[in-house]
Image (cartoon, coloured by chain):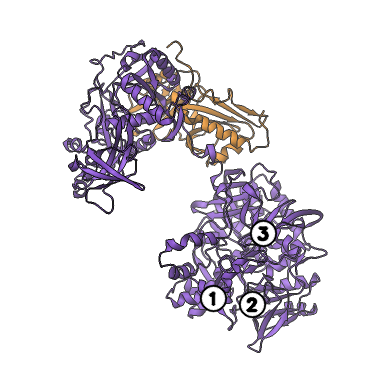
Chain colours: A purple, B orange
Amino acid sequence: MGYRLSQGGHIDRNQTFGFRWNGRALTAFAGDTVASALLANNVRIVGRSMKFHRPRGLLSAGVEEPNALVTLGQGAECEPSVRATMIPVRNGLEVRAQNAWPGVRFDLGRIFDMTAPLWRAGFYNKTFTWPSWQFYEPWIRRVAGLAAAPRLPDPARYDAVNAHCDLLVVGGGPAGLLAAQIAARAGLVVLLAEQDFECGASLLGSAVTINDAPPVVWLASVLGELAASRNVTLLNGTTCFGLYDHGTAGLVQRLDLHGPERTVSQRYWRVHARQVLLATGAIEQPLVFERNDLPGMMLAGAVRQYANRYGVAAGRRIAFATNNDSAYLAALDLAVAGVTVPHIVDSRRAPPPVLAGALREHGVEVSAGTVVLRGRGRRSLRGIVVSTNGDDPREIACDALGMSGGWAATLHLYSQTRSALVYDPERQCYLPRDPRPPLACAGALAGCATLAQTFADASRAAYAALAQAGKAQDPLVREAVVEEPPVSAAVDATRRPPAGRSSRQWLDFQHDVTVADVELAIAEGFDHIELVKRYTTAGMSVDQGKTGNLNTLLAFAELTGRMPADLGMTTYRPPYTPVALGAVAGRQTGERYAPRRLMPAHEAHAIQGAHWWEAGGWMRPACYPRPGESLPEAVRREALAVRTSAGIFDASPLGKIEVTGPDAARFLDGFYINNVRTLEPGRLRYGLMLNEAGVVIDDGTIARLGPERFVVTTTSGGATRIAAWLEEWRQCEWPQMNVFVVPVTTQWAAITLSGPRAREVLSCFETDIAIDAESLPHMSVREGRFAGVDTRLYRVSFSGELGYEVHVPARYGSALWEALMSAGAGRDITPYGIETLLLLRLEKGFLHVGVDTDSTSTPADVGWGDVAARKTADFIGKRSLARPANQRADRLQLIGLTAAGADLLQPGAHVRFAGTTEGSDGWVTSAAMSPNLDRPIALALLRGGRARLGEMVTVHDLERQGPATIVTTSFYDPAGERLHA
Amino acid sequence: MPDPIRSLVGQSALPAGGRVYGDLLRLEVQLQRTVVLLRLAQDSQKSLGRLRIADRPVPQTMNTWLGEDPVYCRVGPDSWLLISVGHHGAELADAARSACAKRAGAVTDLSDAHAGIVVEGPRALDILVRGCALDFAAFGDDACARTRFAQLPVMLRRTSPDRFELLVDRAVAKHLFDWLQDAAAGLDGQPS
């Protein structure tokens, strides 16, 4: 029966907030968390466990909370699986329990608990094998998990920021704050991140004195100084979730904890720190006994935190159970606060005399050599059954139990750096050993049990950081004088009673893992802690085993008779706590998800009604549908226009790379299967480029502008990649060559004119370039003035028609487009888009690398084997082409397909040869209904396809199938007469 | 073609003169500027101290810049960007070719491939750290660097404690400008 104490706590009792819990109106004070407010309002059941749907109450008061995962808000703003212990209450906050139906107090899912023997560790591996896992999976997916993710777009705004500092301090407790103060005074640039919405950590819940004053006085002084320091960034509500190499850290700052008024709800900090000090503290561990998960069972330190920080008693009658000294401090504070503390049971035979004496003075019975056998109660705790030195069990009535099984150093971030650990048998936990630079540890993380030890250790760590940074001066931080009860760090090995049902002794509260699961894992031969972890899933839930990993390890050690020091800890990985995907995405959402490249004539295309496609990172017109015209109709119209009159196409995204220098020809010769050195100035040649494995990676043209000047074109999507590829080879493999590579894709706008009347349109402009067929034959290039602008004029075609590409500096791109459109107005000129171009090239049978090739395609596979074989000079990939596997007759080869069915040929459709009944012999790579041939055509990769020209095959497209005929790849003008017109 | 010089991409989509956020921040788009890339082979960099282009020295220290107009930025071991408002691309490129005639290298006019965006004001750094991982405490007023900003490759130049110039591929200039405006919306100042 939790209730609000009449006094105490760091809450503002003059400021009352109203919030709703499962629709029920409750009140809280400013400074409360959702958890403390629920406890103050006597809400015992805050959630249901993930697997067995057991009722669960608050276990902790901090980041380690495994039970109180709640959903905040509603609709699009709903945020599931938030730890109630980390969220401050605010006016109007909507909080709901999750993973329960119809409600958290009565949950039909409890049936899983009643049938628990069926659902032991690894049950799905054994049970769902017949008829198949897929049979059960949909049902399991419906019932599994903790909460439902919102289906509406997230309206929150997220920010991301980079920061550099001399010292990143993770943890705003006493160790972190003192170290930050020392470092800041010495002039280091310090960034301190505290995951709680307030700094202070254990100081907020303890009753020690610092310099003869309550700890909040010291806290306020240090925080004030840090906040006023220009070289300090103090971040509350900020969790360091990942620590990476070279002092790089990922932090998420919550800016919406006190209300949604802020523009940005969360900020992702990428911190680059020269040194990192971890002051992440330690997490108290539960004791393990039968039904240790009943609502009302809490960590002793949490009971103390709720009383001292929030002025909330966890129950009317609170007992304590421990195997170390720290629970005595909690019991003492509660007793002093006037809460009934009937009993503290201590597994040790010799309890600490001073602390035990103090408790007895407050009427608390201290039972040494006593362990808890089990908890009593159905939906919440009513008492505990204990046994002293193996004597007959007796019952202690209580409605809350503060338990302490010792403290585990919060090693998660430390472990992420793969720094070494050492097992401390006195403290019964692993501690850091030899942190990897630039990492250092201080405070409870390093094993300090008292505040005095923590301050001394933090000072040591801070001065070490100063020395590392070359800051020798004394920052004049006065050593704090601490008065605190004498506490030993020693923890009794007794953590689990010798009796009790192991299937009801919980190790991992969040994943419902019990001692029986570990027993089963051992029985089934899992003899390593990493295997036990994976078999039982202990520590694999979203809390990363903060209150379960150590108990699982120690139970495993006990059950196998091995020493914990010999077992090692399981590996922690980022994130330390769950991170919203939105925070990682930052501004990269919606329109800003990825950069969109715009062509020089973008607005002109928009005015003409372009239907946009994103292709290779560029916004490109797919086609220009007229009013009332569908997209296929527009493509058909445009394709016919190109074949019969003139079409205009914006080819500006075409990759363009200038390669210059005395060795330019030799350099390019190394990249293409085609011979570059024999290319005459003024001519261009189609080229295929391979990787070292002989696989086609790109294609384009090679234009020789002069003896030492080339411009090569690449696919639009490959422009950056191929430029980097050329540069890498220039710098790393062929540094002796005198050659330079300069990407110039966006320097030049490129407008294509195609069709029988293309030359007619071009001739409307003043130019010093002769454009007649003889002077400018197919596959040639000229530099000159065109319409008063320096121009590179290409005679080249990807449509199969007479074609020209006019390349002008990009600033003239829009004007050139409009001028060509204007000149062509009387000549039936038609703008066409990329979809139309791809149809035209398919009719012609031109290769589309990446579409008609896959990651195994060689030149021979796509019909260019003869060219590659004829070239005597070496080129990248040549050696690989000689491999037997690349010369097999049954390789996937590009062929053409025709069919009678209008829409059977679809990209991705599979193809089988006659007589094949299983598997696939290939697939369709490109397909369309040809408007010029008036029949469906396709390109396909077929096993040994070129030897099967004329054969009938079966095409399978989803549920349909039908016949098709294998033909050559060139469907239209195979002799190329139109190109040379 | 009566008036060929019409527009660069996105120019009409970008606010003329950029945007001003009170006294806190100013974003300015600069489309008409000359950018020439000079590349010199390593073994052609002897006596670099004597190299002068258009009567001005080129910086020898990596990631620094020199000059007013034109400005010369050393952006790589073998790369310099020559930037100008008052000089035409062909003019500056010819000057570079002439100065480097006896050195192995390449001069390329890339004026049309780039757009400039100025980020200026007391909150300029707040914007820049949102898009760029550079340590600006170590990025002085004479610094320049090829880096990534908001996923994009850019050349960043600092001209004063509160003034930065971003040189970005023309095709993504609008994306970058939109990104900057979005980042600026998180500032306390309201757009004027």
| Residue ID at (50%, 53%) | A244
Q: Are discs 3 and 2 less than 8 Å apart at CB? A: no
Mark 1 to mark 2 CA distance (whole Å): 19 Å
Q: Which dot marks residue A323?
A: 2
Helix, strand or loop at label 2? It is loop
| Relative to A505, A724 lies left or right | left
Query: From where the camera sits, is residue A368 visible?
Result: yes
Q: Which amino acid is tagged 2? A: Asn
| Relative to A226, A436 lies left or right | left
Q: Chain of mark 3?
A: A
Q: Which amino acid is tagged 3? A: Ala
Query: From where the camera sits, is residue A474 visible?
Result: no
| Residue ID at (63%, 88%) | A390
Quadrant of the rendering where the C terminus of chain A is positioned: top left
Q: Residues within 10 Å of mark 1 (few under 14, many from 20)?
A: many
The residue at which mark 1 appears reads as A515
Taking depth in this image into account, of A462 and A675 the one nearest to the observer is: A675
Q: Chain of mark 1?
A: A
Helix, strand or loop at label 1? It is helix
Helix, strand or loop at label 3? It is helix
Give x and y (percent) for residue A43.
Answer: 72, 65
